[in-house]
Amino acid sequence: MTQDNTLYDVMVIGSGFAGMAAALFAAKRGLKVVQAGSTGGIDFSTGFIDLMGVHPISEGKRWMNPWKAIDAVVADHPKHPYGLMTSDEISASIDGFTDFLAEQGLEYVGNDDRNTCTLTSAGTVKRTYRLPKSAWKGAEAFESKAPTLIVDFNGLKGFSGNQLVENRKERWPELRTVRVDFPNGKGELYPEHMAWALADPANRVKLAETVMEHAGDAEYIGFPAVLGLIDPQKIVDHLEELTGKHIFEIPTMPPSIAGPRLRAVFDRGLPALGVQTLSQKMITGATMDGGVIHFTVGKGKAANTVSAKSCILATGRFFGKGLKAQRDKIIEPVFGVPVCQPEARDEWHGEAFFDKGGHPVNLAGVEVDSHLRPLGVDGSPMHDNLYAAGAVLAHHDWMRMKCGAGLAIATAYKAVVELAK
Amino acid sequence: MKVLQTRVLILGGGATGTGLARDLALRGVKCILAERRDINAGASGGNHGLLHSGARYVASDMEAAIECREEGEILKRLAPQCIEDTGGLFVAVEGDNEQYIADFQAMCDRSKVPARKLGLDEARAMEPVLSDKLIAAYEVEDAAVDPFMLSLDNLAHAMDHGAEYVRNARVVGFDVENGDIKCTRLRNERTGEEFLVEAEIVVNATGAWAGQVAELAGAKINILYSAGSLIVTQDRLTKRVVNRLRKAADADILVPGGTVSVLGTTSVTVDDPDHCKPTVSEVDRIIEDAKAMMPVLETTRYIRAYAGVRPLVLSGDAGDARNVSRGFSLIDHAGDNVDNFVTITGGKLTTYRMMAERTADMVCKKLGVTAPCLTAVEPLPASTMGRWTEPGLGPKSWIQDRNADDLVLCECEMVSRTAVNTIVENMGEMRGESMLQAIGLRSRVGKGPCQGGFCGLRITGHLYDEGHQQGQQGMDELRQFVGRRWRGFSPVLWGLGMVQADLQEALYCGALDLELDDDDETCGDE
C-alpha cells in the first residue's frame, strides 16, 4: 500500500454530477480537493440539466416554471433535498456549474424561469432547464414546428428517425427523416467514433453534401448527438455554414456522446483547478481519526491511503454504487450511514414498472441535517466533517420529478458552502 | 362479422393445444388453434422446462412415473432439437428423511425408472456446486426441454399440414343449440373485433382457464389453481437437472436451460389463474430452502422470476394441491349435454404428447375419422419458428453469417437485426399485433440480464424503421413489453439486479419520460 501524505481539505467520493460539482465548487473556493470514484452516472447522461419538472408525480403534472415546482414539492415534501437550500443558492449553483462548462468550451443555454421542451431519441418530448447549446435549436424547431429533417445513420443503433417522426407527426406535420451513410462509416457505428471522425472538417463537408441531397425546404436539420467530442459548437457552426440550415443535436441512448463530453470537461478542468483526481478508483475503507478521515483507495497492492479533513459523499444510488441493495436491506457501503428505506423488500417497488406513483425505493437514501451531514442511528450527525450530496440523499425521486442533475449540483454546492464555514 | 369454418377448434396454445393441432393435422383433420394471448402464455411457458425421467413420481404416483419414462423416451427420439439430454441427479442432505432415501431405488425399480446410486464424492465431482452435507445421490435420466421451441415446432408442423393459428383471440361465448356448440364467439384482444368460428368439435385446452371456458358452454369442471414460482439464475450452475431426494416439496429442483438454471418451484393455491405472479416472499423462500442442496444459491445472481398455474382437476373434496393427482383429465362434455365439446387439462409438460393423442383419439372418434395417431412415430421437425428460442443460437448465427451491416439489437443474447427480421417474417399473418411481445416469446430477446431494458428500445426503433410500427403504437408496445418483463424482474432486485433496474428506470423514466402521457406538448402549467 502506498501513501499520499498530503492532508486534503476535502475528499469528494463520487464522479457523477454531484461529485464533479462538489469538486468544482470546493476547488473554486480554494480548498485542497481530492476526488475518487469510478465511472459514474454522468457517462450515461443525456447532457440535459433538469432542475425540477414534475410534481406530484402521481398526477404526472408538469411545470413550466421550475422554481414554482420546487416551491410546490418542498411544500408537500418538506424533507426533499431542495428544502435544505434557498432558490438563490440553487440558482447560483447551476450558474456556477454551467459557467465552468462554458469556460471549457461546452456552452449551455436555457431560460431562467422556464423549462424548455426538447425531443428525445425515442420521439418523446422532455422538459429540461439547461441544454447544451448544440441541442438548443431543436427546442426552437419543436416550438415553432418548423419544417425539420431528422438525419439518422445506417449502422447507428438505438436511434430511429422513423420512430421519432412517427411519434410526433400528428402535431408536427413538417417533420421528416432520412437515413444516410455516415462519411466513411461502415458496419456498426458508435457515437464516440463518429464524433472523432467529425473532428476532421473534410468529413463534415461530406456529411453536409450527403444531407443536403435530402434537405429540401427544411429549415432545421437534427442529428443524433455525434457532432464532436470536445467542441460540438464548432462543428454545429460549420455544418450551419455548409448547409445554410439551423443544426441541432438529439441525445442518443447510452452509450452516447453527451456523457463523455461532460466527463471530458471535468477531466480537463478539475486538475487545472488543483483537484487531485483518483479516477476509476473506489474508496474501500474510511476511518475517523479525530478531525481527520483516512481513506483506503482501491484494493490489494494497488491500494493507497489518502487523508482529508472532511468528506463529501456523492456516491449516487444503486447504479453509482452509493447504495447497495442486499436481499434484506439497503446499506450505504462506505461509512455505513443508516439508509432511510421501506421496511421490507416487497415494499421497494410498485407492481407496474411505469407506476404513476413511482417506486417507494426511489425515496430511500441517506438522511441529512440542515448542514447536509448524514444522520446516524440516533438522529444526530454521524460525523462533524462528513457531508452528503446528490442522488444518495433520501426523499427525492429524481427520475420522475425530473430533478437529477439540478439536485446533484445544488446539493453539492450547498455541501461545500457548509463545510467551508 | 367474420366467420371462420373448420372441423375442430382448439382453444389454448400451450404444449397440449399445439400438440393436438399437430396430431389432428397429421391425421388430415382441419383445425384452427385460437389462443387468448400467444404461444405458452399459461403453464406451458411457466414451468421448469424439465423432461421428467419419472423418478420424481415413483413414490407418489406410479402411473405418472411410467408415463413420464415412456413419453420422455419418445420425445428424446422424435424431438431432439427441443431437448438437452442433461441427465439428472436426486440428492439428499443432512436432515432429509432417511426412510425415503432408503426406499428410493426400489421405488424406481418398481416403475422401471432407471436410477443408479452414486458415491458422494462421485456426485460432487459431477456437480461441484452440491453441498458438502450431501448424504445420498442417485443418477437418473431427467433432461431439459425448451417448452417454447416445443410448442412453436408443434405449431409450425401443424400449420405445414393445414392447421391455422389465431393469437390474441379470447373466447367470449358459445352458441349452444340442441346440445351442440354451433359456433364459438371470439374477440381479438388487440383490435376488439369479434369473430365467429363454426366447428364440428371444440376442444378446450386452456389449461388453468379450462374451468372458466367450460362454464361459458354450460359445463362444469372443478379446478384448483396451484401457482408455482421459479427463479432464473444468470449463469448455468449445473450440467444436470438436480432434484432434492425427498417427498415432493417446494424449491426441490434446479434445471439447466441453455446458459441459465431455473430453480423452483412453490405451490400456492390462488383463487384466479389470472392472479398468478411471482412474489418477493416466494423468491426468498425458494432460496432459503434450496441453498441446503447448493449453498451457491444464496449468493448467485438471479435475473428474473416467473410463475405458472398448474390446473389440478378436483374430483372430490378440495385438499392440499400437492396431494391432488398430477395426472391429466380428458373430459367428454356429452355428460354435460354438450356433445361436441371436449376438455383436456391437467397433466404435465412431459406427457403433453400423450395427452394430445388421447384427445385426438376422442375427437376423431366423434368425427368418424379413423386415421391413426402419428406423433409417437413421426419425428417433430425443427422449424424456423422455434429455432430462435435456443440459447446461444444468436451469437452462433451472427458469427457464422457475419455481415458488417447486421447489428446486434439484443446484446445480452446477441440477437441481431437479421434474426429479428427472420422472426417477423416467420410470423406471417400473426405479425402486426403486439409485435415486440411476440418477438420476445419467439427468441431470447429480453431474457438476458438487461430484461428488455436496452433491447426493448432498440428493437422498437428497428420495427419503426422497417415500417412495422406506426404512430404511437410501437411506444405503447414497448411500455407493455417492459411492464410484462417487470413482473418477473421486480421480485429479484437486490445486488446487481437492483443496479440494472436503477439504470433501466433512469433510461426509460429519467431520460425518456416514458412514464408520462405523451399528450401534452406544452411545457406544463405555469
Image (cartoon, rainbow, N blue to C red):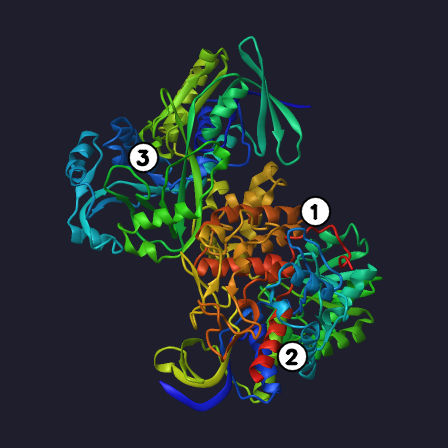
In space, the residues marked 1 and 2 are separated at their CA atoms by 37 Å
Identity of the residue furthest to the top in this view: B178
Q: Is residue B66 above or below residue B100?
A: above
Q: Is residue B53 left or right of residue A400?
A: left
Q: Which residue is mark 3?
A: B72
Please state which of the two labelled residues, at mark 3 or mark 2, is closer to the viewer: 2
Please state which of the two labelled residues, at mark 3 or mark 1, is closer to the viewer: 1
Q: Which residue is mark 2?
A: A230
Rendered image quadrant of residue B369: top left
> Helix, strand, or loop for circle 3?
helix
- Taking depth in this image into account, of B53 and A70 the one nearest to the observer is A70
Q: Is residue B488 above or below residue A382?
A: above
Which residue is drawn at the image coordinates 45% and 39% (left, top)?
B45
Q: Residues within 10 Å of mark 2 (few under 14, many from 20)?
A: some
Q: Chain of mark 1?
A: B
| Observer able to see residue B41 | no
Give the x, y percent position of residue B348. 37, 32
Looking at the picture, which amino acid does disc 2 mark? Answer: Ile
Quarter of the rendering occupied by the C terminus of chain B? bottom right
Q: Which residue is mark 1?
A: B470
The answer to whether the residues at label 3 and label 1 have Cβ atoms under 8 Å apart is no
> Helix, strand, or loop for circle 1?
loop
Q: Earlier in the sequence, mark 3 or mark 1?
A: 3
In space, the residues marked 3 and 1 are separated at their CA atoms by 45 Å
- Taking depth in this image into account, of A197 and B45 the one nearest to the observer is B45
Which residue is drawn at the image coordinates 67% and 61% (left, top)?
A75
